[in-house]
Amino acid sequence: GDGEVFRQGRTAEQPGPWKENRPQHVTLPPAAQEVAGMEFRGLRIVGQLFDLYLLGEREGELIIIDQHAAHERILYQQLRSGYVSREMPRQTLLFPVSIELGPSLAEAIEQYGGELDKLGFLVEPFGDQTWMIKAVPAAASGVDPRELLLEVVNGLGRGPGRQQAGNIPAAVDQLLATMACRAAVKAGASLDLREVTALLSQMDQADLFSHCPHGRPAVKRISRREIAGWFKR
């Protein structure tokens, strides 16, 4: 049970129960299953704190990972990479979702059709002011399709803004960050061992990992010496 894990610790590669008595709340995208380097996957997992932070131990350091900020950074990079390469992975909806739009939003969807396609959406007209959402960006497939589409269309309507590195307009870059935030593991979600392993594996594949796209720290390292000082050892 959990007590055994907290007494002995467990590396993310080792099989066995971890919060085995809790329901599974989160499904990470398929890319999370890829084998990656060992920087994060080699952590000795201590547990999850407040259903907010993952705790790991390695080489005399306590590693604290903000699960939402870390996953947000991963999804942001996946979305950004897909946009730049014009090969945004899509999730085709098993049952297309209809959305009723007023004239201005319908016009906006027609105007930004090419950009929506680059962002991973497949939206087609279906009668008067009704559109069918047939596919969404795979990294954000857990978000309500209607809400996501409206957010993206409204964001595109705010204008392209300045160009970012990689030829991404600032407004689009901000949209990608927002989409990543909406799709990321939420604070308060209980993760099982498989999900923790998947998250750590993805972290190893990401670049510039210290912060989420909104600038919040994703990882905190505390040395054994610093902890000892707290207790005047």
Image (cartoon, helix red, strand yellow):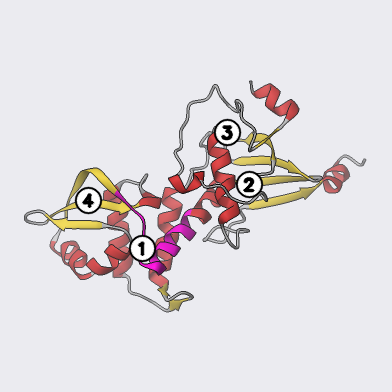
Separation of residues labelled 4 and 2 (CA atoms): 35 Å
Name the amino acid type tagged 4.
Lys
Q: Look at mark 3 in the image and give the residue it sits on.
A: 193
Separation of residues labelled 1 and 3 (CA atoms): 31 Å
Q: Look at mark 4 in the image and give the residue it sits on.
A: 134
If you read the primary sequence from the N terminus, does the residue marked by circle 4 or circle 2 appear first?
2
Foreground of the two, 103 or 119:
119
Quick check: 165 left or right of 12? left
Does residue 152 lie above or below 160 as drawn?
A: above
Q: Look at mark 2 in the image and give the residue it sits on.
A: 65
Near mark 2 (Cα within 10 A), the count class, few <14, some 14-19 or many ≥20, is many
CB atoms of marks 1 and 2 within 8 Å: no
If you read the primary sequence from the N terminus, does the residue marked by circle 3 or circle 2 appear first?
2
Name the amino acid type tagged 2.
Ile
Residue at 52 percent of width and 25 percent of height: 22
Q: Look at mark 1 in the image and give the residue it sits on.
A: 87
Residue at 66 percent of width and 49 percent of height: 38
